[in-house]
Image (tube, rainbow, N blue to C red):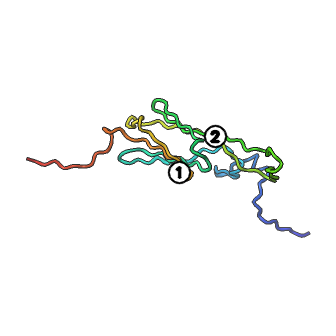
């Protein structure tokens, strides 16, 4: 009897689709997981809070930012990947298609110190920056010394 040693080939199997998580709670096959919630950093300075949303592959037109009372919601809508091209000239013969563009929605409750009229947003290099300026009376004032007369 010959023992054939199989090389460790990283090919997806039916088990990856049936059991998408590994034993330690992580995702075993990231491609099988199509719901993506972007990572968010929240940074505070003396003048504002800054939300940094990691959303590569999007355009600024893809985002919707809504403010409802004290809740700001950042969302995108799903884009369908065409399965067939419309003309024979542009038709590609894929053997596998794993690209997907999924929707997401993230909501954050804003503190009372935010100037809601001055909220701004920019999208640069795959990161959406949402500036949440503080109200003038809530900004951190620099330390000062008081002269004794």
Which residue is located at x 36 percent, y 45 percent? 47
- Residue 53 place in picture, x, y as percent: 53, 47
Q: Which residue is mark 2?
A: 103
Q: Which residue is mark 1?
A: 124
Q: Nearer the viewer, residue 55 or 122?
A: 122
- Residue 138 place in picture, x, y as percent: 33, 39
Which residue is located at x 70 percent, y 46 percent? 100
Residue that protrudes farthest toward the right in the picture: 1
- Residue 136 place in picture, x, y as percent: 32, 39
* Left or right: 142 as drawn, with respect to 71: left
Which residue is located at x 39 percent, y 34 percent? 112
Q: Are marks 1 and 2 in contact (CB under 8 Å)?
A: no
Residue that protrudes farthest toward the top in the picture: 69
Q: Is residue 22 visible?
A: no
Report helix, strand or loop for mark 1: strand
* Left or right: 11 as drawn, with respect to 142: right
CA neighbours of label 1 inside 10 A, class few (<14), some (14 to 19), many (20+): few
Q: Nearer the viewer, residue 114 or 37?
A: 114
Residue that protrudes farthest toward the left in the picture: 149
Of the 4 image quadrants, the one containing the N terminus is bottom right
Quadrant of the image occupied by residue 4 = bottom right
Residue 21 shows which numbered tag?
Answer: none
Q: Is residue 21 visible?
A: yes
């Amino acid at each position: 009897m010959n023992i054939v040693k199989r090389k460790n080939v990283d090919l997806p199997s039916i088990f990856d689709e049936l059991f998408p998580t590994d034993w330690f709670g992580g995702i075993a096959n990231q491609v099988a997981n199509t719901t993506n919630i972007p990572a968010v950093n929240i940074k505070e300075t003396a003048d504002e809070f800054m939300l940094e949303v990691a959303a590569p592959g999007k355009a600024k037109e893809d985002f919707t930012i809504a403010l409802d009372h004290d809740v700001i919601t950042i969302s995108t809508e799903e884009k369908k990947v065409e399965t067939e091209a419309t003309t024979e000239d542009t038709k590609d013969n894929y053997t596998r298609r794993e690209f997907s563009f999924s929707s997401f929605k993230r909501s954050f409750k804003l503190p009372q110190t935010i100037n809601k009229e001055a909220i701004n947003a920019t999208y640069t290099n795959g990161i959406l920056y949402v500036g949440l300026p503080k109200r003038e009376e809530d900004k951190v004032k620099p330390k000062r010394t008081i002269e004794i007369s």
